[in-house]
Image (cartoon, rainbow, N blue to C red):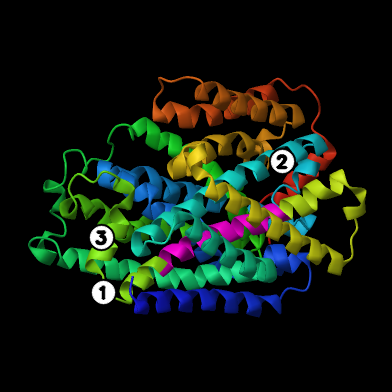
């Protein structure tokens, strides 16, 4: 990287901190800090939901998969996310918005106290918070790898740099800072992504005329929809996982729907996010698919995107592309910190320590900022030790995706009246069952990737439904009232 590249990167960080300072003036209480006061417009919520769904890991772990396995990455990742988000837009997103209006929630696990009981709520809140520490730490490590490739800076320095910037602006600005950073980074990503796409196409042998024929020159299987171990079974597994994740099982994505001003707005936000996932990754991933044409037999395929950017982009544009990667990661890590902080402040601390109940608006906001700061600090420590958890791919894909299902099944299905008979016993049973399967599979050496990823969520899903079917107890009135208030019979 040259001086101009560093200038662009510093300019981007300055913009982030400026957004945080601007948002500080809009945050008057914890509702503003965690849900933007329920005032997010559909276009801002939709863009934020989209860009919060992936991080710099796309340019590291996923770039490695694109290099070795090709187009299948789009099929099992972007396409399944698009379908999952579209389903969420119609069936789940409006319910999250209504929850805020009728139950005054600020965290996605807050409603679980009414839907199940305090034990279920605490189990999901604690488990989800711990999982998020590892997931967010992995994303910090991913962007540090890119900075290392681009500039030679150490991985440790990269993690500390991105962690520190995230720590400052999200702590002072809350969700408003987060969503406006999402919008700003979406603009940066569009410019950088289109630039990278054009540069790579122009450097293809034969130029623009070969934009659609590169697949004939790539390694065998790279043009296939499914390329082992990313089989059709794996794709369906990811579709299931992504439905629960992008519906709100990944808490920061639930917050985008919760913070929407109405159910209709939340639905439109989900549809916008779905369309973006269907179209934009085709441009974003294209240079990654073409990487084998420029770098043959890389020892570490995860470095492919960074090496292409360094080789083909002139000074200034290299910094812009790196800024867009930082933006992706900061968007996700900051929103994770904000949402997990809401869960800790609203659902965990008041149950452990009664002194945290019924706080004044000023003290509640101060607690929100302290909790956000501490959570982000812990994720930085995990990122510094990512290699001990199976590396970046292991943290983000294997650990997070496999563990997400068991806690998200009772969260998402609990919103739907068709599963009203599945109470706290079903919820706790499904969580413990899914986590147990995950632990058992970690001890088994010979297993397919699809089975490793899908077995925990399938176990949770089956247990949640079956235990509910055998439940002979009447549905509590509070649960019936909750589902009625969340139904489409209520216009909001």
Task: Tell me if residue 269 can be seen.
Answer: no
What's drawn in magenta, residue-wise?
323-341
Tell me the residue at 85%/45% (across/down): 351
Which residue is the site of mark 3? 308
Image coordinates of residue 342 in percent, x first then y, are 72, 55
Q: Tell me, yes or no, whether the highlighted magenta stretch contains residue 336.
A: yes
Q: Quadrant of residue 181?
A: bottom right
Within-10-Å neighbours for mark 3: few <14, some 14–19, many 20+: some
The mark nearer the N terminus, 1 or 3, is 3
Within-10-Å neighbours for mark 1: few <14, some 14–19, many 20+: some
The mark nearer the N terminus, 2 or 3, is 2
Q: CA distance from mark 1 to mark 3?
A: 11 Å
Q: CA distance from mark 2 to mark 3?
A: 41 Å
- Secondary structure state at the residue bearing disc 2: helix
Image coordinates of residue 1 in percent, x first then y, are 33, 70
Which residue is the site of mark 2? 126
Total number of numbered discs in the rendering: 3
Tell me the residue at 47%/37% (across/down): 390
Q: Which mark is residue 314?
A: 1
Q: Quadrant of residue 429?
A: top right
Tell me the residue at 51%/74% (across/down): 13
Q: Is residue 74 above or below residue 424?
A: below
Q: Is residue 333 above or below residue 68?
A: below
Report the side of 53 relative to 474 (left or right).
Answer: left
The mark nearer the N terminus, 1 or 2, is 2
Q: Nearer the viewer, mark 1 or mark 2?
A: 1
Foreground pick, 485 / 382: 382
């Amino acid at each position: 990287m040259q001086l101009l590249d560093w200038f662009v990167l510093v300019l981007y960080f300055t913009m982030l901190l400026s957004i945080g300072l601007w948002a500080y003036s809009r945050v008057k209480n914890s509702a503003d800090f965690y849900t933007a006061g329920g005032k997010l417009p559909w276009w801002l919520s939709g863009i934020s939901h989209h860009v919060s769904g992936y991080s710099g890991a796309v340019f590291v772990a996923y770039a490695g998969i694109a290099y070795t396995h090709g187009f299948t990455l789009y099929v099992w990742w972007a396409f399944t996310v698009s379908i999952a988000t579209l389903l969420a837009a119609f069936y789940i997103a409006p319910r999250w918005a209504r929850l805020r209006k009728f139950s005054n929630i600020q965290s996605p696990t807050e409603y679980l106290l009414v839907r199940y009981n305090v034990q279920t709520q605490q189990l999901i809140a604690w488990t989800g918070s711990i999982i998020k520490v590892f997931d967010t730490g992995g994303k910090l490590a991913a962007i540090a790898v890119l900075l290392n490739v681009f500039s030679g800076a150490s991985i440790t320095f990269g993690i500390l740099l991105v962690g520190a910037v995230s720590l400052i602006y999200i702590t002072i600005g809350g969700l408003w800072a987060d969503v406006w950073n999402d919008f700003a980074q979406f603009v940066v990503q569009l410019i950088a992504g289109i630039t990278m796409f054009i540069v790579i196409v122009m450097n293809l042998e034969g130029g623009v005329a070969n934009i659609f024929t590169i697949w004939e020159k790539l390694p065998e299987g790279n043009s296939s929809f499914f390329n082992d171990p990313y089989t059709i079974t794996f794709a369906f597994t990811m579709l299931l996982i992504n439905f629960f994740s992008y519906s709100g099982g990944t808490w920061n994505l639930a917050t985008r729907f919760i913070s929407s001003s109405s159910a209709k707005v939340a639905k439109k936000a989900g549809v916008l996010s779905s369309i973006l996932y269907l179209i934009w990754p085709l441009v974003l991933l294209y240079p990654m698919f073409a990487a084998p044409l420029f770098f043959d037999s890389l020892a570490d395929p995860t470095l492919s995107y960074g090496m292409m950017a360094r080789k083909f982009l002139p000074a200034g544009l290299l910094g812009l592309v790196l800024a867009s990667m930082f933006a992706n990661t900061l968007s996700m890590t900051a929103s994770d910190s904000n949402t997990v902080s809401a869960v800790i402040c609203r659902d965990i601390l008041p149950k452990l320590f009664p002194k945290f109940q019924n706080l004044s608006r000023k003290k509640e906001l101060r607690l929100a900022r302290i909790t956000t700061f501490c959570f982000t600090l812990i994720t930085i420590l995990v990122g510094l030790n990512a290699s001990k958890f199976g590396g970046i791919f292991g943290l983000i894909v294997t650990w997070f995706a496999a563990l997400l299902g068991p806690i998200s099944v009772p969260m998402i299905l609990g919103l739907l009246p068709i599963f009203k008979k599945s109470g706290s016993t079903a919820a706790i049973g499904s969580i413990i069952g899914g986590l147990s399967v995950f632990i058992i599979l970690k001890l088994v050496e010979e297993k397919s990737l699809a089975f490793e990823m899908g077995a925990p969520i399938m176990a949770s899903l089956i247990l949640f439904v079956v235990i509910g079917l055998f439940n002979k107890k009447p549905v509590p009135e509070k649960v019936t009232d909750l589902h009625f208030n969340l139904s489409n019979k209520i216009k909001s």
